[in-house]
Image (cartoon, coloured by chain):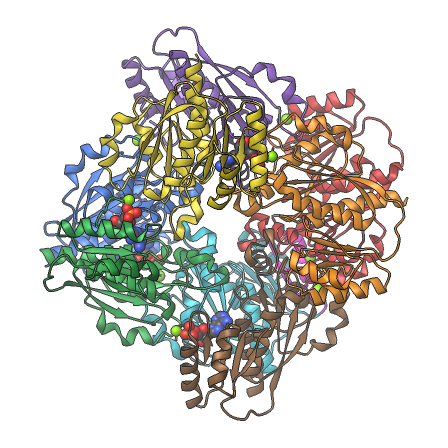
Chain colours: A red, B orange, C brown, D purple, E yellow, F cyan, G green, H blue
Amino acid sequence: ERCGFPEVIFGTGKSAETVIEIAGRLLAHDQHVLATRIEAEKAKQVLERLSDARYNPVARTIRIDANPRGPEVGHVAVITAGTSDLPVAEEARETLAWMGVRATMVHDVGVAGPHRLPERLAEFRDTDAIVVVAGMEGALPSVVGGYVPCPVFAVPTSVGYGANLGGLSALLAMLNSCASNVAVVNIDAGFKAGYLAGLVATRRGTV
Amino acid sequence: ERCGFPEVIFGTGKSAETVIEIAGRLLAHDQHVLATRIEAEKAKQVLERLSDARYNPVARTIRIDANPRGPEVGHVAVITAGTSDLPVAEEARETLAWMGVRATMVHDVGVAGPHRLPERLAEFRDTDAIVVVAGMEGALPSVVGGYVPCPVFAVPTSVGYGANLGGLSALLAMLNSCASNVAVVNIDAGFKAGYLAGLVATRRGTV
Amino acid sequence: ERCGFPEVIFGTGKSAETVIEIAGRLLAHDQHVLATRIEAEKAKQVLERLSDARYNPVARTIRIDANPRGPEVGHVAVITAGTSDLPVAEEARETLAWMGVRATMVHDVGVAGPHRLPERLAEFRDTDAIVVVAGMEGALPSVVGGYVPCPVFAVPTSVGYGANLGGLSALLAMLNSCASNVAVVNIDAGFKAGYLAGLVATRRGTV
Amino acid sequence: ERCGFPEVIFGTGKSAETVIEIAGRLLAHDQHVLATRIEAEKAKQVLERLSDARYNPVARTIRIDANPRGPEVGHVAVITAGTSDLPVAEEARETLAWMGVRATMVHDVGVAGPHRLPERLAEFRDTDAIVVVAGMEGALPSVVGGYVPCPVFAVPTSVGYGANLGGLSALLAMLNSCASNVAVVNIDAGFKAGYLAGLVATRRGTV
Amino acid sequence: ERCGFPEVIFGTGKSAETVIEIAGRLLAHDQHVLATRIEAEKAKQVLERLSDARYNPVARTIRIDANPRGPEVGHVAVITAGTSDLPVAEEARETLAWMGVRATMVHDVGVAGPHRLPERLAEFRDTDAIVVVAGMEGALPSVVGGYVPCPVFAVPTSVGYGANLGGLSALLAMLNSCASNVAVVNIDAGFKAGYLAGLVATRRGTV
Amino acid sequence: ERCGFPEVIFGTGKSAETVIEIAGRLLAHDQHVLATRIEAEKAKQVLERLSDARYNPVARTIRIDANPRGPEVGHVAVITAGTSDLPVAEEARETLAWMGVRATMVHDVGVAGPHRLPERLAEFRDTDAIVVVAGMEGALPSVVGGYVPCPVFAVPTSVGYGANLGGLSALLAMLNSCASNVAVVNIDAGFKAGYLAGLVATRRGTV
Amino acid sequence: ERCGFPEVIFGTGKSAETVIEIAGRLLAHDQHVLATRIEAEKAKQVLERLSDARYNPVARTIRIDANPRGPEVGHVAVITAGTSDLPVAEEARETLAWMGVRATMVHDVGVAGPHRLPERLAEFRDTDAIVVVAGMEGALPSVVGGYVPCPVFAVPTSVGYGANLGGLSALLAMLNSCASNVAVVNIDAGFKAGYLAGLVATRRGTV
Amino acid sequence: ERCGFPEVIFGTGKSAETVIEIAGRLLAHDQHVLATRIEAEKAKQVLERLSDARYNPVARTIRIDANPRGPEVGHVAVITAGTSDLPVAEEARETLAWMGVRATMVHDVGVAGPHRLPERLAEFRDTDAIVVVAGMEGALPSVVGGYVPCPVFAVPTSVGYGANLGGLSALLAMLNSCASNVAVVNIDAGFKAGYLAGLVATRRGTV
Ligand SMILES: Nc1ncnc2c1ncn2[C@@H]1O[C@H](COP(=O)(O)O)[C@@H](O)[C@H]1O
Ligand SMILES: Nc1ncnc2c1ncn2[C@@H]1O[C@H](COP(=O)(O)O)[C@@H](O)[C@H]1O
Ligand SMILES: Nc1ncnc2c1ncn2[C@@H]1O[C@H](COP(=O)(O)O)[C@@H](O)[C@H]1O
Ligand SMILES: Nc1ncnc2c1ncn2[C@@H]1O[C@H](COP(=O)(O)O)[C@@H](O)[C@H]1O
Ligand SMILES: [Mg+2]
Ligand SMILES: [Mg+2]
Ligand SMILES: [Mg+2]
Ligand SMILES: [Mg+2]
Ligand SMILES: [Mg+2]
Ligand SMILES: [Mg+2]
Ligand SMILES: [Mg+2]
Ligand SMILES: [Mg+2]
């Protein structure tokens, strides 16, 4: 579990054996399984044993449905600044899929190509919440926040070099966002941003 | 305006004159006014000119209603670790009031008095979102996050001394929270956390 | 002089007496005078003695022309994210005026109000160089850099609170800009950015 | 030796040969041996030569008793937030065993699962001292400190990612603990916390 | 109260009125009173109302005994590197007095005068615990730790200039101490170190 | 693309396949190709497919001309402090070649050999702009800036050890340069400095 | 005394009374007195009581000779980058005077005016040791180190703004100096650099 | 060469070929050769070609004498806190040997074993200068500085873990040393400290 939320398996430092064991226990309780931070080799071992498991090699996640799912609820957009931010965005998307939330992906609309984001506004203006994934200067969440009225969950990524300080520069920029609707999660924490956006989206769905 | 959200006046560095002028313009457009970071002296000048304005000296905010309000919607809890966190919590509460959202205050339930929080669970278990304000070790959002299924917006405060680094220690702790439902805003940013929680609460309300 | 450019007086730590003395020496050599970082009180003393001196209280600069000036050359835009960035922008503008360069001011077009900048593009698309002044998340230079083909000199300001770290957050963001045409100067260094932009603009003018 | 305490061998950078040689010397003086930070490969070499040595692969420690031991004295609890904190906790436990102090392990009771710690209070309420091992937000020592009247020795671990800064975030949180009875040791320093707790426990035992 | 130990009043940000009110409540429950971080002016107001209160202007503490005390128990030494460390050391001493623990003060024995500490060893060799207070390079705890077998609680102070970083340099040095028996508390946290040492000393006393 | 400038391929994290595909698209639009951060192995794969591509193994860049080039315009000097700064300087030089700008290389003239730079002044006194590449103490841009009237684009490199902090020390020194004509780019960002200098040089050329 | 060198009084935090008392004790032992970090007001009080004391208001030092001095020995140069570095340089010079060492001052020869230092080489080429005082980019010690064969003691100053980080940028630059003969002392520590240079100079003198 | 001191070869990033070539040139000019930071494999290649070269695998240095040497001059002590500091100390010792200075090694006398240093005082009390090498808390230079009247060149090492921050903690401690005669060089810079001490020692020798 990722600190007290037994339903999500945080793969770092866990053996394939342990992942399989926890997944089995969850399925036995009719809970959908999500495992994050699973490297390819470990995933292979898990998939050999759990035939329903699907591995997303970009997100490095495994998902297993405990039972047939109903239609997706709500709507969350996952927006990236550049292609290097994709793995983190995919982790968010898998998290939303596991929660049963509809997700729209909008890629490669970073601020230095300022025409690209407005062109795609129609795809995410009516969302319940938005996940914005960006490295380097971490400016995209502020711009997105300026276009939409819903909560924006910003994920800084460790993409960059030199003074990017492993993602700290993007993190600091996002915390200082002058858009009022931007909240921040840890560097590369695609799961967390997806989970928070999913919570907002499913709450609406349940009314 | 606080960076593109003309309806909220960020008082730092603005003269009473400027605050009055912007407030007047908002009221003329039938918009409720919220001004934050207004010191007592400046507030006095504003209140002399705008008789409907109400000043909260702890939050250092001014609010003016443009027209009669309907009943409050949604439900947000604002929880503090200690009494020194009060000003930031009050800023969040005023922001929620301005948005028309019902707020419950739960004060002084920091983690080193571990019996205090559970005793008050009933007051915030059914909320739409929670604002948690804490300085020093910044541990309270994780604990709150473990008790509730809704989004938690954590606000680190600059309360403390020595290695608290002006709030950075609490900020870092909150970003590293092992509770999945904790998002973070800037140090002392009570307004932002209140605004985000309010967005979640009103969206539900509008369905 | 400390830095080898005798023609600009850095006022910090210099007495009015010293400023007057250096200014006198420059005028005697037929050089236009620019003094930066001059507080109001010190400026008053200088102006009492040097009647041609003009003080800009926002920029905190003094200028004195050694002789009549010809028409301005080149074109530089000075763009700010918010009103708090004004003093730094004014220091850049005064520097350009001292260099005899035409300057256009574009204010308050920060990224969280994403409609504002494009509306004003016409004013700065044909410039020789651009100075962008921004605090908080420091995102504006990247966006400007995406719209124009000329060099952008980014000035982080110490505007903000909490995790803005006295301007370091904006500085780091700007250094990590994914726009190729963005160079950075020290926090609050309006003079330096103005000077660099002026160098680019006057070089073209001298061909 | 670990800086002047010849009775404990700090394995980092020492060859198996050197470890064996120091251990031999200690045993010749009838001193129990503890060696920390011994990787598996090096341990294998040591065990081949010193048949009484026991290796704990999780703690990465080797212990050899110089002579039969009497009953354990005192009582120390070693508490962890999550499973990744285990190696550091085991290093503390081995240190206590080497000192002849009774140790109780309480695992995986991190703050984001707030029900888990109170359920196990009975196991550590009467201890002489407590070692608390936690990474990420480093919040557990404050909570434990609020439940017990004895000294708490907090060990931050480098467990986490992104803004955990290799354990610095947990370290800073612990230093800012608002519980009065929390002292802190270096990141991952399980040995030190165990040693300090053991000192407190054995002193009581000797009265 | 913020931190769960209601019996100690942390004066920062509390009015004289509040301090008097809490002190009264504690005395009514027959509890000895300790208030820390009380500036001279505030102390004067408190002493006017509570005639039994004694103010220590160096420590900036107030103490009031609820009832006659028995003889002191245990033995703690409080050792300083230089005279500037005195206020923090005095806060520790007052805390020990409030706990009823015997304290020995050993002043101005910093490492750059290496003859001074050994000369005074006799005064603290038999203590239950030691508080070492040092700023600048923070080296003294390691040396003391090398002389004694009991726990050492190191308090970094913000004494110094330049690269002392407000006490961070001393803090980091102490965390890296190569003496096994050194634990660390927050910068300038004389209260905390005194409290921890007092806990060790009184536990022995109660056997 | 390097964030919105589709004409330059930033190789980090891109497969040879992707590089080839983008390069092909650019050539089809008659655009000269520049790809940076291409490791030797990846370059080999690209060159096997694109026969006109030239790889610079020191700069780790690939260039392909879309059509015959006219004569070079403008003049930029690229100056290095030491031989370890060569790769970054070469990246700048390749960028200038791709832009069609004449470049002069002046190597190994770091400040601790203070006779070397003045001896070579003649080679760069008449340039349009200068790129200065330096690691360690990052002092060279200030000295160069003192000799020339044109803009200086300073690139800190990650060359050094210990307190060089991966280039941060040189970066900070350059930001604090007391020469007015020094602007700074990210650590190791040879491309950016070359691009900015090229923009200045080609603008002059276009008059 | 804090630091083991009883003959120098560190004025920070000491009352005029204490300074006078220590000075008297030193004079009674026939020792020359040096007191550093003495503000003007405190100095006035000291001079009223000790008539032989001489105060240097720039250096903020007091000196009193215990007895007539012989001729000065050795030769140390104290070199500054800019006029703001003067107070620190003067502290070094007073320290050398107190040690009886001949000092040459070379001011305002910072690296951005690269012609100035070589012109004055004759004044310091034959020195026993050199003190170099510089803020901002801290580049001067490397250049001086390249001209002379003797030890250079570099003092970073807190002169500057923005990313100078209170002198840390200059400190880091100096530590990374590529001149082999450059050692560094704390920020603003003119006394220490003067003392070290004086030790080198007097040792030669005593042969 | 990078740093203007052609006689010392900094091996990092240089091929065996380059080292051999520079060494050959130096020998042709009758200069003794010192090469630092040479890994074992590279050393082997150099020694195959230059038969007089001697490799010190702990120091990772190569030395070649250009001609027979006279007797050593002066006296420098190289003191280490622990065995892990040995490589850096050996680099200093080899530098002194190359300069023709007599060196005394005093090992493993770190502050947490406070009896060890005084026992060996006789070995270094009469030295011209002292090199002190220490990691972790970096306290040893202050203690040594308190015993001797000559300059102390302190070298922080990157030895340690957790909050040692790659040697920064020791560096900061040394800069804050309260001993007046302690100067500091970069982390792990054994060469620099040896060179500075050697300069002091040979100057005396030349009188
Ligand atoms: N506001 C400013 N920010 C940064 N540098 C400045 C500023 N004003 C002047 N300078 C630089 O400082 C030099 C003068 O320094 P000084 O000799 O101390 O008066 C000028 O020639 C400029 O290079
Ligand atoms: N000087 C001090 N330094 C650190 N913590 C203190 C100090 N004085 C009191 N405290 C702690 O703060 C608690 C009271 O905080 P509060 O509720 O804000 O009065 C006490 O119970 C102690 O745990
Ligand atoms: N300006 C200064 N900077 C650094 N250290 C100083 C300074 N002045 C005096 N000291 C040192 O501080 C010692 C005296 O400290 P104290 O016992 O606090 O007076 C002196 O012997 C010097 O070693
Ligand atoms: N281990 C070392 N640490 C620091 N500086 C060194 C070291 N070895 C050589 N140097 C310096 O680097 C210069 C040579 O640099 P380079 O031109 O890169 O070979 C020498 O003259 C020394 O000043
Ligand atoms: Mg892209
Ligand atoms: Mg000057
Ligand atoms: Mg605005
Ligand atoms: Mg767990
Ligand atoms: Mg409280
Ligand atoms: Mg003293
Ligand atoms: Mg070189
Ligand atoms: Mg040892």
Q: Is residue E162 visible?
A: yes
x, y percent for residue C139: 65, 60
State the residue in front, B75 or A8.
B75
Q: Quadrant of ligand 11?
A: bottom left
Question: Who is closer to the viewer here, E161 or H13?
Answer: E161
Q: With C150 as the anchor, is D17 left or right in this view?
A: left
Write the residue at 31% across / 14% down: D27
Is B4 on the left-hand or right-hand side of G69? right
The residue at 53%/27% (across/down) is D133
Q: What range of the chain is rendered magenta?
A: F1-29
User: Looking at the picture, does residue G163 appear above or below residue F128?
Assistant: above
Q: Is residue F72 visible?
A: no
Q: Position of residue D135 (x, y in %)?
A: 56, 33
| Front-most of residues G74 and A128 | G74
Q: Quadrant of residue G198?
A: bottom left
Vertical order, F129 against D146 (above or below): below
- Relative vertical location of residue B22 with respect to residue C31 in this rendering, above or below: above
Q: Quadrant of the C terminus of chain G?
A: bottom left
- Comparing C69 with F70, the one in front is C69
Verify whether residue A150 appears in magenta.
no
Residue B171, x across and y down, in percent: 60, 43
Q: Is residue B103 left or right of residue H73?
A: right
Total tally of numbered discs in the picture: 0
Q: Position of residue F98 (x, y in %)?
A: 58, 70
Quadrant of the frame with the N terminus of chain G? top left
